[in-house]
Image: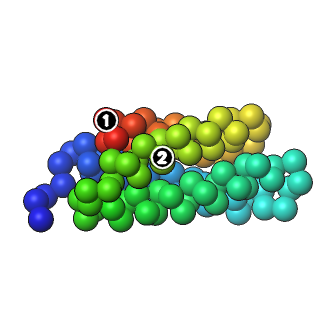
């Protein structure tokens, strides 16, 4: 297996940052009824970003297709989290937007 190039490593790092931010957001606001959609997006982001990291790290032939889906999901999560004033929601949105951009580049 060849070493990871910088673009691939950046995408892995951005996915990991997104996982962490989504987890913090979820933990902070779990059970708040007006944030149900936010919770679901965060859970989905965590699951998909974990899969993305694993496929990117192994340089799988399927990573480009998974990154395309991940970019869409992370953008949707960011859009939802950005609606809330909470600092952790804003941080989650920021990390999700960054992940969406990296994944979009990997998918191209």
Classify mark 2: residues with Cα within 10 Å, few (<14), some (14-19) or many (20+): some
Q: Secondary structure at mark 2?
A: helix
Q: Identify the image quadrant of the C terminus.
A: top left
Q: Earlier in the sequence, mark 1 or mark 2?
A: 2
Residue of label 1: 108
Relative side of 2 to 91, left or right: left
Above or below 48: residue 105: above
Residue at image position (38%, 60%) is 53
Please identify the quarter of the rendering in which residue 87 is found. top right
Residue 5, percent from left and from top: 17, 48
Classify mark 1: residues with Cα within 10 Å, few (<14), some (14-19) or many (20+): few
Residue in front for this viewpoint, 20 or 47: 47
Above or below 103: residue 50: below
Whether residue 66 is visible, yes or no, is yes
Task: Report the disc number at residue 45.
Answer: none
Q: Secondary structure at mark 1?
A: loop
Relative side of 86 to 102, left or right: right
Q: Are marks 1 and 2 in contact (CB under 8 Å)?
A: no
Quick one: which residue is furthest to the left in this view?
2
């Amino acid at each position: 297996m060849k070493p990871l190039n910088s673009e691939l490593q950046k995408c892995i790092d951005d996915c990991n940052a997104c996982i962490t931010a989504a987890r913090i957001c979820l933990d902070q606001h779990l059970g708040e009824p007006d944030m149900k959609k936010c919770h679901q997006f965060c859970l989905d982001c965590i699951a998909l970003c974990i899969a993305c990291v694993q496929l990117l790290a192994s340089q799988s032939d399927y990573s480009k297709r998974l990154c395309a889906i991940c970019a869409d999901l992370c953008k949707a999560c960011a859009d939802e989290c950005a609606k809330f004033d909470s600092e952790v929601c804003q941080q989650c949105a920021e990390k999700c937007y960054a992940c969406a951009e990296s994944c979009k580049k990997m998918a191209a």
